[in-house]
Amino acid sequence: MSILINDLTVTFKNNVTAIDHGNLEIPKGIFGLLGENGAGKTTLMRVLTTVLAPDSGTVSLDGISYEEKNYGKIQKRIGYLPQEIDLYPGLTLQECLEYMGALSEIPKEKCRERIEYYLDKTGLMEHRKKKMKQLSGGMKRRVGLIQALLSEPEFLIVDEPTTGLDPEERIRIRNLLVDFSENRTVLFSTHVVEDLAATCNRLAVMKKGSFLYAGSMRGLMEKAKGHVWICEVKDEEEARGLERKYTVSSKQYVKDGMRIKVISEEKPETPCTATDAALEDAYIYITNQGNFEE
Amino acid sequence: MMIKEMKICLPLYKMVYAIFFTVILSIIRGVFYSYEVGIALEAPMAMLAAVFCADTYTREITAKRWEIWRLYSEKSRLSAIFRRLKIQEGFLLVLSAAGYGMFFLFQKPCSLLGIKEGAGNEAQLFFMYMAAMAVTLHFFGILSHTLSCLFRNMWAGIGCCMVLWIVADSVLGDRIFGKWNLFSYTFRNVEDCGDMGWLWGKLLCACLCILMLAALPLLLKRQRA
């Protein structure tokens, strides 16, 4: 299954252009969507779930065009975890998933089996009899993810699924998404770079409604190659001077002063050595340099 | 499914305020004759239905679940909404019957049975009241739900219902709409139990209910932001 987005534009009533003539191909597997808050990630996902109709451009899912007459067919193939969701507080976790499974028209027995499987996979089995309102934010997030997986959709769209999760839970969810993505398409939106580094091979970077990059993870890092530098400075004062001139992706105190990671098109004037770009560095490089096409 | 739906659309706070409202009404709204009990209950219970049913679907919007709901089939969505309406209106109908009893319990109204010709007997009055209430509750429940869906806001739905309620339940409303008034049962000739002219108003309510229910799929489709 692949999703093709061609010249997509979405403008809100207040004339804010959330997506500006975007082109993208989302292939099978996990596809990452990276961007700062307000970049247009959620808008893109709302278009893909048929919640929002674009102003212009086309979208197709496995050749099925996003048109009113095809929405039924498309919606059947999609699972969605929105950024914010408050699941039925008066129901227990088990009841909540059974209810949402029934709305998805999953046969009762199959639904129970799947709930069992995903509760086990997400570490929620022991909490199944707790009411939704008694669960922590991280647990609710996991339940939200299970409801999206329950119908075993061919195209899964998850908007920041790891928000509010502790490191162990995050790893569990990332692994679950990787397992799920076999023979399916998963669109994984986040602004947590390390989540994508751990799960995706391909990704798109968005900024202010435009795709700055779309392609392989390696390709993105290649773009930043030769633009990441490690500078050793003596004190805070010197570090501040560097920060004023360049984009600094990290800094830490070391024995003899401070070590600063600088992202710059050219070698900084301060003594420094070139270093390999991590995904985070590449993301900062791309979002600060303007549009790049693979 | 029905039990889960009950837990969703009939939370404790809703049941408590509805019961409280009915008990208070049966204590403070004075009646002298038994035929006045139905009149005392119809309009207030209609407003209660409007408030009670306004969040039937909008609760999905406020809890930000509506984007997921959009992925369910139209049949699933409509079935869930109809189930919720059925449960809420069923509860209100039972409460209306209990409210009728409460008036007798707290105020012990006089019966015209055997005193005035054509006044009907108590059972006849009660069944007439229940039939009228079933339609009234159904109408105001569906109306407030429909308007809330239209505006995507339950308060807008309740507000519009309140305007209609004030107009219909007034002398002016009685003059304008006559036997077609939404509260035709309240404005009927109470001294003649055989007068069934009020059925016209209820027939109008029933027809409007059918129209609103038929429009529901369209309303749900236009939920796209």
Image (cartoon, rainbow, N blue to C red):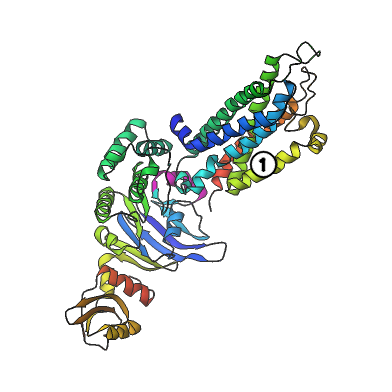
- In the image, residue B1 lies in the stretch drawn in magenta: no
- In the image, residue A69 lies in the stretch drawn in magenta: yes
Q: Residue furthest right?
A: B175
Q: Secondary structure at mark 1?
A: helix
Q: Residue furthest top?
A: B114
Q: Residues within 10 Å of mark 1 (few under 14, many from 20)?
A: many
Q: In the rendered structure, which segment of residues is drawn in magenta?
A: A66-79
Q: Quadrant of the N terminus of chain B?
A: top left
Q: Residue furthest bottom?
A: A269
With respect to residue A281, does B97 lie above or below? Answer: above
Q: Which residue is mark 1?
A: B161
Q: Is residue B11 visible?
A: no
* Residue B161 coordinates in the image, percent (x, y): 67, 41
Q: Secondary structure of the magenta portion, mostly?
A: helix
Identify residue type, mark 1.
Cys
Q: Nearer the viewer, residue B187 or A7?
A: B187
Q: Is residue A231 left or right of residue A13?
A: left
Q: Nearer the viewer, residue A232 or A187?
A: A232
Q: Is residue A292 left or right of residue B196?
A: left
* Residue A83 coordinates in the image, percent (x, y): 41, 54
